Image (cartoon, rainbow, N blue to C red):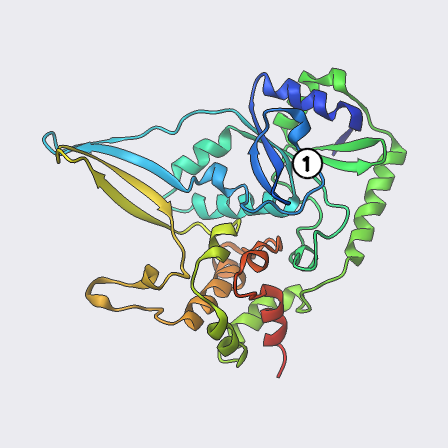
Amino acid sequence: MKYNLLEKTKVSELVNALKKKYRVVGPKEKENLFVYGDIEDAGEIRLEHKPPILSLKKYYLPQEEQLLAFKFKEVKAVPVEVKKENLVIFGAHTCDITGIICLDHASSIEPRDSNFHKRKKNVLIIGIECLRPCDEHATCVTMDTHNPKGGFDLMLTDAGNNYIVQVNSTEGENLINEYKFLFKESDAKSEDGLIKMRQEKEKWPRSLKVKTDDLKKTVDSGLKHKEWESVKARCVSCGNCTNVCPTCYCFDIKDDVDLNLNNGTRSRVWDSCQLKEFAEVAGGENFRKDRKSRQQHRLLRKFSFSVEKYNRFFCTGCGRCTRACMAKISLYETMNNLVKE
């Protein structure tokens, strides 16, 4: 593992240097919250931030994406090529980076999502390590996403006047070499301090009381628990939880036809399993008619089905679903209640 040091006073210089070659996006303030957005000026970026409203998912799976254009007279469909864009994501938390790892798993099975992988190929991630829990909604310790586990090119960790820069890829090393005038070599003291700091993070409080190894069993065996009646009574089926989730990837397909009825486009748009019509099929049958079954499905997708299919949880512990819920349904409270009698 390679490490370098970056003086905090040189972060703006690094961002501005990157902007000459890449589109740079990162966390920005917006009405007392944070969003990932284009960095027009290095002063906009906020490296100390709670998870932005939407995750990095939007840069890999756009909320609406045109897949092809077609002409009726020619009976011809022309795929729309993904625009090649060199993108640097600067300041991503480890929970959001984990979300991209999950999406990579889901997008790699057949039929492979080529658009996702074309975008991912042109993205560089410079992460920022959390030194404290974001808030009481974060469950990153239980989900084991509080420490960097891969999926990034460079990771910055606050070390006083400097950031320790962990190099995790060839592309990350190339960045260091390209902008080597901004970096300096790391030292044993800084690297030892990094190890100790990450060990201390294991002591962070756990709002989610269920042990990591018991998460799947808790959801699988708790489907008849009375807690679901409380969740059902409060849920308004708005879909906020899935929109903000970094690992939800369900979509719908829509066709738009021009008024002349000669041309049209086919697009995919984000969809949500929490909407009543999501599981509705021809004839009006609905496999998940009620809010209870839809909420259960959401947790099964995060803690059970994903383990069976990908051997990993699809919850990153970011806490977005709890923060975004208008009905104040908390993922960790629901899980904690499932283990109560």
> Residue 17: x, y in percent?
65, 18
What residue sits 27% from the left and 34% below the top?
68
Residue reaching furthest to the left: 73
> Residue 238: x, y in percent?
43, 60
- When asked about the image quadrant of residue 150, the answer is top right
Report whether residue 7 is seen.
no
> Residue 146: x, y in percent?
70, 50
**Picture layout, residue 26 above or below residue 53:** above
Residue reaching furthest to the right: 189
**Picture layout, residue 261 above or below residue 249:** above
Residue neighbourhood size for the residue with mark 1, other residues' Cα within 10 Å, grouped as few (<14), some (14–19), many (≥20) = some
- When asked about the image quadrant of residue 36, the answer is top right
Please, what is the three-letter code of the amino acid marked with disc 1? Arg
Residue reaching furthest to the bottom: 341
What residue sits 56% from the left and 22% below the top?
22
Numbered disc 1: secondary structure: loop
Residue nearer the viewer, 56 or 177: 56
What residue sits 44% from the left and 24% below the top?
84
- When asked about the image quadrant of residue 206, the answer is bottom right
